[in-house]
Image (spheres, helix red, strand yellow):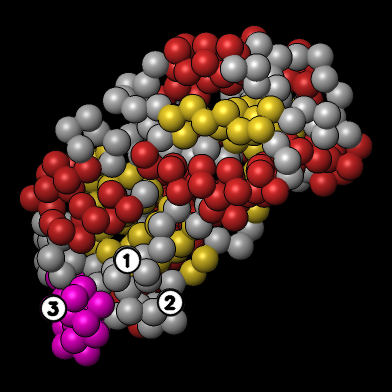
Amino acid sequence: MKRREFISLLGVSVAWPLAARGQQAGRPIRLGVLGPTLNNPTAMAQYQALRTRLEELGFREGPNFIIEWRGVDDPRGPFVSAAELTRSHPDLIVAIGPEASLQAVAGASGFVPVVMIAINFDPLARGYIANLARPGGNITGLVFQQLELAQKQVELLSQAFPDRTRLAMLFDSQSADQFEAAERAAKALNLQVQAIRLANPPYDIDAAFHRVVSGGAQTVLVLSSPLFLPHRTQITQLANTHRLPSMFIAKHWAQAGGLMAYGADFELMYRRAADYVAKIIKGAAPADLPVEQATKFELIVNLKTARAIGIELPTGVLLRADEVIE
């Protein structure tokens, strides 16, 4: 039986026990989270957005509400992390990141409700949900498709630097489909693409930028992968050292020194995931909660970096920016 057919059966047959279990005397509600490892300020800020929203909704960590976090980018792999998480018998799981996160949780969690923040894959096309309006089964949450964003990032770079036609793109296996979308956009704009694919983490960033520079790149686009996050400072510093205008997926890259970032408001998505968690704890069935798609996007520009690498951004780009870092 295919997963989607199985979901259709589950949507009408599963009795969700979460609310009843949460009211048992002495039995705390356990929330498991599989997401980016909490080893950097960005991941911590996003996790805090989730916790803060849960507290606003009446769910504060303590004897009656426990949150356990595991890293999807754990060197042992997401399936090991998911197995560890489920051994604590969580009442509900939040799965954040690329498909590997949801795939690992779906395989290990059984019928435990799952709230996803699905980044850069289509859970409907992959069979995790029956449809967006009524997902069926035990999975619901939010979807963030980055393919169109990758194309938009290329367009913004081209508009900001129309005389720079050689674009390097850094990507890996988790962002390969973004690369394909960005490459199509670059070719439509008559840009020469230098593909820099990284493999075998932890990545050799110095070697990657040696290839970027030796290939004559004039701008650089770093596509979105959780495996790039540990190298964030190194990547932005190398781009700036070589005076390469750079584009990234999220605000924290610009805050770390990248020139520009265009992407979704991730902290808002974490807060919306908390809303789903609260609804399910209070008795809602995941099968009946529509899946949302990210709707708020932002362009961040770091003027301090622009001055440091000796470039001037067009007025049009600055006017479009949602935030300018001085």
Of callouts 3 and 2, the N-terminal one = 3
Instruction: Inspect this view and state whether residue 54 appears.
Output: no
Q: Residues within 10 Å of mark 1 (few under 14, many from 20)?
A: few
Q: Which mark is residue 126?
A: 1
The answer to whether mark 2 and mark 1 are in CB contact below 8 A is no
Label 2: element kind:
loop
200 inside magenta stretch: no
Which of disc 3 and disc 1 is earlier in sequence? 3
Q: Quadrant of the C terminus?
A: top right
* Residue depicted at x 65% and y 17%: 216
Q: Secondary structure at mark 1?
A: loop
Specify whether residue 7 is painted magenta: yes
Residue 85 in picture, x, y percent from top left: 16, 48
244 up-or-down from 283: above or below: above
Residue range corresponding to the magenta coloring: 1-21
Tag 3: amino acid? Met
Tell me the tag on residue 132: 2
Query: In the rendering, at what x and y percent does residue 123 appear?
Result: 36, 65
14 or 154, which is in the foreground?
154
Residue carrying label 3: 1
Taking the spot 45% from the left edge, 53% from the top edge, the residue there is: 120
